[in-house]
Image (cartoon, grey):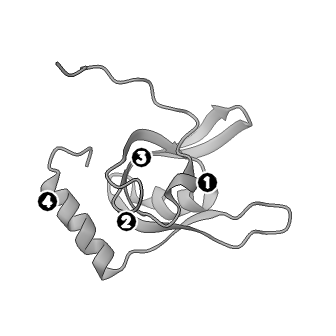
């Protein structure tokens, strides 16, 4: 018998380093302008995320918060829609870490996403 209950969402969000180089599909749910974290108040984008290739293929992170600012800027304009891209990092500014960002999906990447969506009609998407 499967468990009908889910655990609470993590306010800490995804550990992006685990998915570096992976093709990610985001279902963008909303924008949260004021989220309290251990580092103070910040903004976040709420989303479901599916890893479509790489070491963590088929990992589903449902109802998570996206905190990295560059990633937020890439997906928050697509609330109610989907965003597909390959996770990478940009150049670090002096005194800061490299920002997480999505590279544009290739035609091959889009084919992987289409196949996933066709096969997984009950996915969070």
State the SS at label 3. Answer: strand
Q: CA distance from mark 1 to mark 3?
A: 13 Å
Quadrant of the image occupied by residue 8:
top left
* Of 80 and 113, the residue lying toward us: 113
Is 73 situated above or below 58? below
Q: Earlier in the sequence, mark 3 or mark 4?
A: 3
Report the mark closest to the observer, 1 or 4.
4
Q: Residue at x 67, y 33 (%)?
A: 37
Which label sits on residue 68? 1
Q: Is residue 122 left or right of residue 52?
A: left
Q: How busy is the neighbourhood of tag 3: few (under 14 within 10 Å), some, or many (20 plus)?
A: many
Which label sits on residue 18? none
Total labels: the figure holds 4
Q: Earlier in the sequence, mark 2 or mark 4?
A: 2
The spot of residue 114 in percent (x, y) is 21, 66
State the SS at label 4. Answer: helix
Q: Is there CB contact under 8 Å for labels 2 and 1?
A: no
Is 59 situated above or below 83? above
Q: How busy is the neighbourhood of tag 1: few (under 14 within 10 Å), some, or many (20 plus)?
A: some
Q: Residue at x 62, y 56 (%)?
A: 69
The spot of residue 62 in percent (x, y) is 37, 40
- Residue picked out by circle 3: 47
- Residue picked out by circle 2: 84
Which label sits on residue 118? 4
């Amino acid at each position: 018998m499967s468990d009908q209950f889910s655990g609470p969402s993590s306010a800490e969000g995804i550990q992006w380093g685990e998915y570096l180089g992976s093709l990610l599909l985001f279902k963008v749910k909303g924008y949260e302008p004021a989220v309290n974290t251990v580092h103070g108040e910040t903004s976040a984008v709420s989303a479901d995320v599916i890893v479509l290739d790489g070491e963590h293929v088929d990992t589903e992170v449902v109802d998570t918060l996206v905190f990295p600012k560059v990633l937020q800027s890439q997906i928050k304009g697509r609330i109610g829609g989907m965003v597909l891209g390959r996770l990478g990092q940009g150049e670090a500014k002096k005194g800061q870490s490299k920002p997480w960002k999505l590279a544009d999906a290739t035609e091959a990447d889009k084919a992987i996403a289409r196949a996933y969506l066709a096969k997984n009609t009950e996915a969070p998407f």
